[in-house]
Amino acid sequence: MAVTSHVSADGNQLIIAIKGRFDFAKHQEFRDAYERGSKPNSVVVDLKEATYIDSSALGMLLLLRDHTGGDEGEIKVVNCSQDVRKTLAISNFDKLFDIT
């Protein structure tokens, strides 16, 4: 599976990990990862194993942001490669998400 997810031990954080290309082919898996189960206080999107991110992935991140409450939601995007971080910065996603 290219998109995996689990809830932290305390149940307050959902961690979604992407492996390989983060593009439209992952849309349903990504959506399933955050729509099933209860709604945690925060979400971490781990891109450690993501090799590529495109505009459809940016759209998926925006849908996740809406799902978690927009400005009120807490989403961290972590472990970005230099290329992925550059794509996020060019798209001004550093203003919408906590990117580390």
Image (cartoon, rainbow, N blue to C red):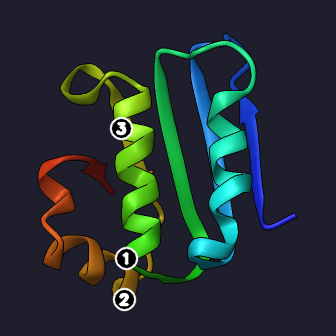
Residue at 67% from the left image edge and 67% from the top image edge: 26
Q: Mark 3 points at which residue?
A: 65
Residue 92 in the image: x percent, y percent?
A: 12, 65
Mark 2 or mark 1, which has the lower sequence index?
1
Residue 75 in the image: x percent, y percent?
A: 38, 37
> Disc 1 marks which amino acid?
Ser
Q: Name the residue under label 1.
A: 55
Could you tell whether 53 is left or right of 18 in the image?
left
Mark 2 or mark 3, which has the lower sequence index?
3
Q: Which of marks 2 and 1 is in front?
A: 1
Describe the element under mark 3 as helix, strand or loop. helix
Q: Which quarter shows the C terminus?
A: bottom left
Residue 93 in the image: x percent, y percent?
A: 21, 60
> Disc 3 marks which amino acid?
Arg
**Rendering quarter of residue 46:** bottom right
**Rendering quarter of residue 6:** top right
Q: In this view, does 51 lie above or below 95?
A: below
Residue at 18% from the left image edge and 72% from the top image edge: 91
Asked if marks 1 and 3 touch (Cβ < 8 Å), the reply is no
